[in-house]
């Protein structure tokens, strides 16, 4: 804005330093936008030159490269002020906006999407290439600071115990740690678990020492009842159900142990977190059929 005294006020963006983690286009577009803005505000080219010198110093002081500032300055100098003052009509092209978090890999992901975009053009709404927008990536604050903490209130002895009163109690392996039956992996239970514990990764052990790894957001009790029902009805085709049928195991022979409870932090993606942890266990503990009772590894959990 032009004040009566002839002073020009720049937007806050002028004060953004260049040594931050912002997109290159954003960093070069800030001087360009600011010099064009200045050209709009200045009635004559001489006035623009005067003010632009001050603006250039300000940008230089903030660490912007001289080349970028020079280009932006020239753009402003030779721009036609009349057309700059006209309101621009935005194009009405309907383009999909692809929003990606801004990280060091964003550019690569964008290139991959564009490279394979032709695969999607069979759909009429995807004829135009997408517009890319970026959201702020995770910063140190997001990684380090959690306003809500783990519930560590006077917790009883760690381990898995029966709740002494539900239909699932008979399936509980009462233990303080769970040993992989065939591999040298042992999971020490870090908290107190019983039938009502939720947000867990669990292992089901069959009488012939085969393992199934699962996860649930609900209570383990509810999930085990679901497994028992699947085994009973045999309706769902899964390695677990098939193995139980083929080997003639009974429902009562199912034993389980909670391996981990995941924190329910505010703003966290608990479902994705559970799935990812589950898939890691399946991979490292090698519980895919035929060795174990899991169907496959769901790699898409990590996308
Ligand atoms: Zn119970
Ligand atoms: Zn078995």
Image (cartoon, rainbow, N blue to C red):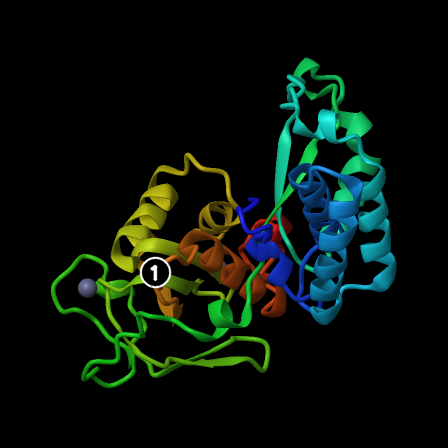
Q: Residue at x 26, y 57 (%)?
A: 221
Depth check: give the residue in front, 150 or 220: 150
Helix, strand or loop under label 1: loop
Depth check: give the residue in front, 47 or 188: 47
Q: Is mark 1 within 8 Å of ligand 1?
A: no
**Image spot of residue 84 (x, y percent):** 71, 30
Q: Residue at x 29, y 64 (%)?
A: 171
Depth check: give the residue in front, 125 or 77: 77
**Image spot of residue 103 (x, y percent):** 67, 58
Q: Residue at x 57, y 64 (%)?
A: 280
Q: Residues within 10 Å of mark 1 (few under 14, many from 20)?
A: few
**Quadrant housing the N terminus:** top right
Residue 104 visible: no
**Image spot of residue 14 (x, y percent):** 63, 58
Residue 298 vertical placement versus 116 (above, below) = below
Residue 144 visible: yes
**Left of 19 or right of it: where is 151?**
left
Quick one: which residue is furthest to the top in this view? 124
Depth check: give the residue in front, 83 or 179: 83
Q: Quadrant of ligand 1?
A: bottom left
**Left of 208 or right of it: where is 156?**
left
Quick one: which residue is furthest to the left in this view? 165
- Corner quadrant of residue 216: bottom left
**Image spot of residue 282 (x, y percent):** 57, 62
Q: Residue at x 67, y 42 (%)?
A: 37
Q: Which residue is mark 1?
A: 266
């Amino acid at each position: 804005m032009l004040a009566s005294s002839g002073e020009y006020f720049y937007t806050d963006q002028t004060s953004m330093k260049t040594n931050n983690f912002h997109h290159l286009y954003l960093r070069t577009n800030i001087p360009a936008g600011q010099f064009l803005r200045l050209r709009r505000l200045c009635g004559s080219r001489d006035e623009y030159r005067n003010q632009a010198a001050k603006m250039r110093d300000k940008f230089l002081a903030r660490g912007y490269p001289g080349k970028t500032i020079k280009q932006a300055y020239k753009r402003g100098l030779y721009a036609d002020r009349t057309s700059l003052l006209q309101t621009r009509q935005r194009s009405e092209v309907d383009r999909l906006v692809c929003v990606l978090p801004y990280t060091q890999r964003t550019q690569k992901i964008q290139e991959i999407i564009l490279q394979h975009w032709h695969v999607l053009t069979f759909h009429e709404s995807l004829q135009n290439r997408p517009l890319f927008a970026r959201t702020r990536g995770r910063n140190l604050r997001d990684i380090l600071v959690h306003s809500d903490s783990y519930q560590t209130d006077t917790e009883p002895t760690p381990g898995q115990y029966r709740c002494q009163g539900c239909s699932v109690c008979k399936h509980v392996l009462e233990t303080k740690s769970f040993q992989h039956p065939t591999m040298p992996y042992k999971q020490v239970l870090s908290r107190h678990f019983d039938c009502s514990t939720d947000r867990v990764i669990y292992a089901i052990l069959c009488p012939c020492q085969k393992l199934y790894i699962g996860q649930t957001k609900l209570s383990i009790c509810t999930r085990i009842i679901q497994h028992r029902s699947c085994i009973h009805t045999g309706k769902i085709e899964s390695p677990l159900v098939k193995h139980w049928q083929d080997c003639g195991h009974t429902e009562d022979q199912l034993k389980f142990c909670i391996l981990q409870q995941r924190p329910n932090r505010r703003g966290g993606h608990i479902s994705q977190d559970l799935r990812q942890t589950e898939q890691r266990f399946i991979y490292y503990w090698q519980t895919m059929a035929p060795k174990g009772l899991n169907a496959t590894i769901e790699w898409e959990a990590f996308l």
